[in-house]
Image (cartoon, grey):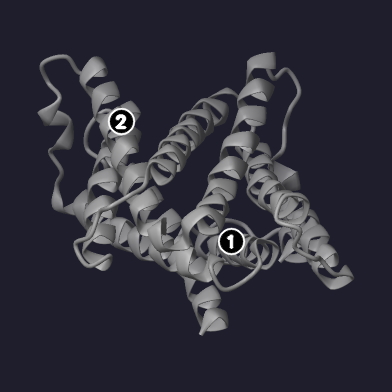
Amino acid sequence: MGALLLVIVPVLYSFQTLFCKLFSDRYSGRKDLATPVFCVFEGIFITIFTWVNNGFVFDPSWGTILIGLLNAVALLGYNTCLIKASALGSYAFVNVIQLFGGLLLPSLYSVIVLGDSIGILQIAGIGVMLLACVAMNIEGIQLKGTPLIYYVMCLLLFVCNGMYSVLLKVQDAFSADQSNEMVMITFGVMGVIAALQLKRKEKGHTLAAFKLDRHSIIPLLLCLFSAATAINLLVVVLNQMKATVVYTVNNGGVLVLSWLYSIVIFKEKITLSSVIGV
């Protein structure tokens, strides 16, 4: 069952990425408001979805509350750094950095802290995945003249994406039966913070930012359902399999599927380096 779920999870996360892009492209309001608006919807939807999936139970311990709050900070930091870094420099380099963080930090945590064994095949798998990510993005990496703050944002993105994954595993080790409560806290708090940010940006006009037309609401709903299902399945898989295996397969699956979407749906050019990477 764990292996089957491990196949489904990256498919769902790739759908999340695809539909999130479609929502952002079709959002009719100011483009700088698309992210906080999405985060509010995501926070509300995933919190309610996970609560229902948990049998309408929400009874976290103080330890779970703390882990959930820390993960909310990591998730918010990830979203913030992703947006700022992408605006300051090469988005291809940003893609490489975030995948490295999401793969390396949880793997190191599992080996060093949890004492998980890791074989030559797993090490080779991680290495191949990192090289593949570089190959698929190498042609878009342009760093000449990039300001120092860009590299700071990339470093923080590396840490935030890695810590988000690490804290999911921390919760699994601390109290696996409260993983759903941790997810609810993480996304609920993130949604509240995003709403406060939106209110600060749009004084007196906050509700207007949530007016969606049919062109944007459909990809939003599909994205939210994919994201909510993915995170709930991921916490189950993490309880059954090693983090090194889960995050390598998940990141690799999302990487390849996103590449296919870019070719088939967005008609992007196929390059030799991207084919080698795949």
Q: Nearer the viewer, mark 1 or mark 2?
A: 2
228 sits left or right of 202 in the view: right
Whether residue 269 is visible to the viewer of this picture, yes or no, is: yes
Q: Which residue is mark 2?
A: 194
**Image position, residue 56 (x, y; %):** 19, 62
| Secondary structure under the numbered disc 1 in the rendered image | helix
**Image position, residue 22 (x, y; %):** 35, 51
- Taking the spot 52% from the left edge, 67% from the top edge, the residue there is 10
- Taking the spot 55% from the left edge, 74% from the top edge, the residue there is 6
Residue type, numbered disc 2: Ala
The tag on residue 136 is none
**Image position, residue 197 (x, y; %):** 29, 22
Nearest the eye: 175 or 218: 175
Q: Which residue is mark 1?
A: 259
Determine whether 259 is above or below 192 in the image.
Answer: below
Q: Are marks 1 and 2 in contact (CB under 8 Å)?
A: no
Whether residue 15 is visible to the viewer of this picture, yes or no, is: no
Residue type, numbered disc 1: Trp
**Mark 2 closeness class: few <14, some 14–19, many ≥20 residues within 10 Å:** many
